[in-house]
Image: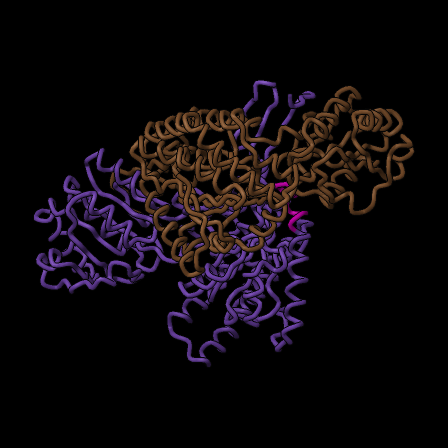
Chain colours: A brown, B purple
Amino acid sequence: MTAPLKAIAKSDIADLMHQTGLRARTAASVLALAPARQKDDALAAAAEQIRARTGDILAANARDLAEAKASNATAAFLDRLALDEKRVNAMAAGLAVVRGLPDPIGSVTERWQRPNGMMIERVRVPLGVIGIIYESRPNVTADAAALCLKAGNAAILRGGSESYRSNAAIHAALLVGLRNAGLPESAIELVPTRERSAVGMMLAGLDGAIDVIVPRGGKSLVARVQQEARVPVFAHLEGICHVYVDKTAKLDMAKAIVLNAKMRRTGVCGAAETLLVDAAAASSHLCPLVTMLLDAGCEVRGDEGTRASDARVKPASEADWSTEYLDAVISAKVVTGLDAAIAHIERYGSHHTDAIVTEDAAAAEKFLREVDSAIVLHNASTQFADGGEFGFGAEIGIATGRFHARGPVGVDQLTSFKYRVRGSGQTRP
Amino acid sequence: MTAPLKAIAKSDIADLMHQTGLRARTAASVLALAPARQKDDALAAAAEQIRARTGDILAANARDLAEAKASNATAAFLDRLALDEKRVNAMAAGLAVVRGLPDPIGSVTERWQRPNGMMIERVRVPLGVIGIIYESRPNVTADAAALCLKAGNAAILRGGSESYRSNAAIHAALLVGLRNAGLPESAIELVPTRERSAVGMMLAGLDGAIDVIVPRGGKSLVARVQQEARVPVFAHLEGICHVYVDKTAKLDMAKAIVLNAKMRRTGVCGAAETLLVDAAAASSHLCPLVTMLLDAGCEVRGDEGTRASDARVKPASEADWSTEYLDAVISAKVVTGLDAAIAHIERYGSHHTDAIVTEDAAAAEKFLREVDSAIVLHNASTQFADGGEFGFGAEIGIATGRFHARGPVGVDQLTSFKYRVRGSGQTRP
């Protein structure tokens, strides 16, 4: 079931990738016009196949795991790579969720009439071919392919070479889904080689076959994709998210939000990395917040003001303000009011997600207006930075670029649009 | 008033451009938060200044023209470069039009509530810094700068070296507008050198200072920008626009639309370049359409079927189907029905603007759905491909890319967005 893993000559890889791109482009033009029902049928059949093939998928995964162990992979790496029945079921359930979303294609997002009687509509159409470059988590194979398919796009998947067999087994299930629904199998292409040069070819756009790249993985992968890609990229390099506790914040609310923003899950991009406390609230709010974090097992690295609040606070270095810990560590600083908080976020943040806790409506509006991040929140946790929590059903990632998609990237964000104009013989004067 | 034109060393140019980028980036953060009133005041003052400085602008233009004449520029080139009182007035009027548009910044394009009570809004914010690279028409200096300013963006303008003095004179008027409104002058930077290397630096993104490039000019300029730019580009390379006359088309309507689409103005990107006629309508529609075009002074290059309709039709070569004439020339072909018309457009078109003339609603819907162009029209002229005609007030150009902006690019398309979330203490479970 899985493709052979033998080495291939470089020129052969270029040809292999070129052909992959051509097939995906052809499939994309079929998918673009496929009715919602057909795409949903493919997703339903794929989910069924993934469940039915749990044994095959786990066997392929076991071989990937054995190889990774033999090459001394870390425990964290092995955990990301490992599948079990629960994770396979979750993949199938994910396909069902995407299937249940409304089809974005053909939906009219704006409609207006011109004085000459012409009706103009702005209508969603697919983007085309989406390249997904990811690392060890095999579930991305199913998750990303499903979102692309739902939005009428073809996908070219390039997973980590360590998860190649697992990805191939999952991919085989997806292909049955496409076949059963009468859609071209090339709608979901899995790069047929583990050779690293394939990534460079994708970043160059595969001779015009790839319209956009979505990287899924760690910072070094995303950085490489952002630097080298010659096509648009939907991504965020890091999430240096802030919670600013204003002087009028209710202490209980601030505690709940700060604890959730930092500690609910520390490894997600929406986790808070820096706590900013208004100097005017330092005497009332700072100590309870810092003590709460420390008691919850979070290391706190603070400026002088913060260190005065609890002896356990470690000194923060300049580098801490621009560090994404993705761990139970937070940097903390006392700032002289809202303007200083905003200035700190603009200087050290990553334009991802930032929150203010305040009872002062004017302060909240100023923060929401002036902080230049994809997501800005008032009195809510930064961990809501998620397509599911936004109501998008599922997301392929979060983007911090300013073009096309920003914030959570769901099926709607995986579309383009065109203008349909309906006239009755109008000519331009 | 105009900057000196002496040669500058290459390293100095790099530094000059770097500083230009830094200034624009700083200005962009001020502009992003500038109230509508302040931007409008700047536009009003700039319009007034342009009118008041007509003499200066025409004097600078006369020097540009003299230099261009001395270097044997073509008559068409000189016409594009030349300003007169009417053209200067039109520039000032254009600023007033942009001033009158609603400010897109801060407008909420979507709003929804989550089951946990959080309110989420998607709100327009500026893109940042827009680089405009244009050729000989000096009016782009005012037109493009105004659109960028209205949408809260800083602009870095790089006009043709032949129009340098004219651009500088217009730019000086714009700066007075900014100054009078209390906005930073760096909101509109004119590249302070005629050296060609400046263009390459802009295409590389000026060390991160430029967010998007808009080229305004001929095909070779756009091609270079599309090939070399490392930042997003809003552009179209060419407009190979089609009118397909279906068998059920009313002949009078078809004649009016074809004549307008081709001949209203032949040099615009929305001008039709190919006429496709349904074979089932060849006997009734082909001859009247072809004769009408020939009689209107349009050269017709046709396939065999078209040549049979009038002896004046010249034979079309394969290259004709993918040629943008921008002149009183049209290629014409008889196609066997709607599917063949769509297939022709997909193969030879440029995904810009295409129209169907038909009384058959199902055929119209199929055409509007299946033709993958930025603008598709039913029973209306392709020359409506224009931001003004769409009701956008003004446009900076037309884009055929699939990302962010597609079709006419007006002030709304020169914005990005962010999500504002308003909660009451929500944390994520």
Q: Position of residue A300 (x, y in %)?
A: 82, 34
Q: Quadrant of the N terminus of chain B?
A: bottom right
Q: Position of residue B328 (x, y in %)?
A: 25, 62
Q: Is residue B233 above or below residue A273?
A: below
Front residue of A400/A395: it is A395
Q: Position of residue B30 (x, y in %)?
A: 68, 47
- The prevailing secondary structure element of the residues shown in magenta is helix
Q: Give the residues drawn in magenta, as a range.
A: B28-37
Q: Is residue B231 above or below residue B78?
A: above
Q: Is residue A368 above or below residue A349?
A: above
Q: Is residue B162 magenta?
A: no
Q: Is residue B36 magenta?
A: yes
Front residue of A356/A177: it is A177
Q: Position of residue B157 (x, y in %)?
A: 56, 60
State left or right for residue B125 relative to residue B353: right
State left or right for residue B415 relative to residue B78: right
Q: Residue at point 61% right, 22% down?
A: B118
Q: Quadrant of the C terminus of chain B?
A: top right
Q: Residue at point 65% right, 41% down?
A: A74
Camera sees residue A366: no
Q: Is residue A246 above or below residue B25?
A: above
Res A171 quadrant in image? top left
Front residue of A119/B403: it is B403
Q: Residue at point 58% right, 58% down?
A: B205
Q: Residue at point 84% right, 26% down?
A: A291
Camera sees residue B229: yes
State left or right for residue B366 relative to residue A260: left
